[in-house]
Amino acid sequence: MASTTLNPKGKFGTAPVFLTAISTILGAIMFLRFGFSVGTVGVYGTIAIVVIGHLVTIPTAMALAEIATNQKVEGGGEYFIISRSFGLTIGAAIGIALYLSQAISVAFYIIAFTEAFDPVIAFVQQNYGFTISKMSIGIVSVLLLAWLMLTKGAGSGMALLYIVVAILGVSLIMFFAGGPIEGFTSPDSFHFNKGDNDFYYVFAIIFPAFTGMTAGVGLSGDLRDPKRSIPIGTLAATIIGMIIYVFIAFKLGSSAGSATMGDIENHQLIMADIAIWWPIIPIGLAAATISSALGSVMVAPRTLNAISSDKTVPIPRLNFWLSRVKKSNGEPVNASLVTCIIAFFFVLMGDVNAVAEVISMFFMVTYGSICLISLFENFASNPGYRPAFKSRWYISLLGAVMCIWLMFKINSFYAVLAILIMILIYFVLSQYNKKSDMAAIFSGVIFQASRNLQVFLQKRKANADDAWRPSVIAISKDSFDRFSAFDLLRWISHKIGFGTYIHHIDGYLSKETIQKTNEDYERLVKMTQISDSSVFVDTMVNPSYTNSISQVLQLPGISGQENNMILFEFNKHHPEASDEIIENLSLAKAVNYDICILSSSDKDFGFNSEIHLWITSNDYQNASLMIYMAYIILGHPDWSKGGQIKLFAVYPEEEVIEQRDKIQELIKSGRLPISANNIEIIPKSEGVTNKEVINDKSRDADLTIVGFRYELVKHEKSEIFMGYDKVGNVLFVNAQNEKEII
């Protein structure tokens, strides 16, 4: 055992895919429970079960055919398709659950296989006086399967598969050639039982019969031409199986009464009473169940082998051991051994009815995933996705929705349990596989959804009644020297607002600057990942800072909403840095942007606890925007623990009483959402400037927000932003218009 991959030279054609699938579809449920279904919900109720079940299986088969004709399906079948579409971590979470369901299915089919020996057990007991245990038959069967897989491999199993499918075909022919059972007078089951409880209870029993259509996909690594064999074999088995089930329902309804078929204790093998030669039905049951077990015992190890070959199991040595295959024929003997041990354990338990429902849940999740892959690929419009066979997006959507709906209809508890198990597996695997492996399919879906939303919002006429929200674009040369502007932007864009951060790079576009752009972009993305922010980041190369600002102001908003605010930042200890900002404020005014200028200090944002707002008598236009910004910032988790807003209003002494009454009225009406205890009205004293008052009152504030008028900037230049030496970071705000606080 030297090789670590399955035999690259496929040895099977289309027939094994079809035979593996059809022998699993026409298996234990058909012989043991289909008569019970007709007797309980009637012929038409049973046909409804067949149709509803195939609303899952046909879309899944079509999705499989589509995916298989687009990409090379290697070893692992369904797991390979899911993992290469959804990424290794999600794929492995579903794949492990899929493998367990396939491995436990071996035990399920073996137990069903022992039911075929009822006539033999009765004969031996009657004539020889001793009882043969069904469990002993099951144990011997598992051991024989294990010996076959470990010594001969899938090749010998496939040879046996041809024989059992031939027996299965003969048993069906003899069943259809038979007549009504003794004592049958007239059909009484051609009705539709609308009892919801009976219908879905029976559906839960019958549905596993239809889940075999993907059984042949697990042989993908051993096929000469998977792109041809998987679509043809899977679709043919699904459609032929559905047709046969419809005919069986009519045959049962016209050959036996409802009471007889519903008596599962005495007429479990009702088909034997109808067949022209009754022994062929137990023989057919034995052939069908052993072939299903054989199909599962061939497929399950290949799923496990593919999972371990991707090194997704958290135990490296186990990955290596399970991925080993026999050099001579490429058989995954170690994975086969594990599968047989699992099957042996569940056969010893003797009753897997409860487990069988969980198995159905895992299969439904698998089928739903396959349908979603087809749906997402069609929606993503990836140019590399060019399948020779194309399903339709609405068919895949139908299959995915039906999977989820039926999971909860069959058994809500097991549906939730199956989902929780896979979430737990995903969590464990994601801790082991730290590297993100989001597949291209998700990126494509996100890109298409983003594009469609952008176009929709662009076409939608702006509603004047829409609540205002900030869509901020920030530009800075000092992105990696000071993080204040980036932090402020991520707080604004946490929930309510939207933020775009542009890092300006001085220079002309060249090979060197492009390389620096890529490096800086990676650093920006890392900043967003570490800070868990919703900020969209990018870089811009330009020899002129003014030209960069001009271009930035024309960028579309990332949310579909037009940008309405620009954020600048400078170091207050280097006031000359604000000159370049002041020179370009006219550009922001020209496009009617609100303007925020952050003056950063060594104190930065302190303890992220207190925000001070300063309002003056001629500053009402800025006041509402300042309050909005303070509340948006305070809503971020960095500030929400004990954070508070304090509002300071500076008015001439003769206006204090009037302004106090006005502010109290705003508080009562809800237009000023600040507690009266956090509002302080300060009479303006002669000889004391507003800056001196702010330096005194806000020296311990973590962020101070001050309004400014554009007209004053033109006269006072950078002086308007200077003189706040005793406070920490100061955010200067200029609103284009008053924002209504609602």
Image (cartoon, rainbow, N blue to C red):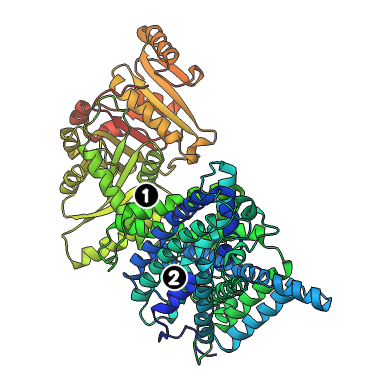
User: Considering the image in quadrants, where does the C terminus appear?
Assistant: top left
Query: In the figure, 545 relative to 647: above or below?
Result: below
Q: Residues within 10 Å of mark 1 (few under 14, many from 20)?
A: some
Q: Quadrant of residue 139?
A: bottom right
Q: Position of residue 143 (x, y in %)?
A: 67, 81
Left or right, 381 with respect to 286, comes to left
Estimate the x, y position of residue 695 in percent, counting from the top left: 41, 29
For the residue pair 552 and 464, the one nearer the viewer reads as 464
Q: Which residue is mark 2?
A: 80
The circle drawn on residue 482 is 1
Q: Amino acid at mark 2?
A: Phe
Q: Residue at x 65, y 83 (%)?
A: 144
Q: Quadrant of residue 627?
A: top left
Q: Secondary structure at mark 1?
A: loop
Q: Position of residue 387 (x, y in %)?
A: 29, 67
Rendering coords of residue 400 (x, y %) = 43, 53
- What is the spatial separation of the Cα atoms under label 2 and label 1, in whole angstroms? 46 Å
Q: Looking at the rendered structure, which numbered label has been put on residue 69?
A: none
Q: Is residue 87 left or right of residue 140?
A: left
In this orientation, which residue lies closer to the viewer: 27 or 399?
27
Residue 274 appears left or right of 385: right
Residue 573, image quadrant: top left
Badge count: 2
Q: Residue furthest right?
A: 129
Crowding near pointer 2: few (<14 within 10 Å), some, many (20+)?
many
Q: Look at discs 2 and 1 and give the one toward the viewer.
A: 2
| Residue 317 visible in the snapshot | yes
Question: At 41% across and 48% down in the image, what residue appears?
Answer: 533
Q: Amino acid at mark 1?
A: Arg
Q: Earlier in the sequence, mark 2 or mark 1?
A: 2
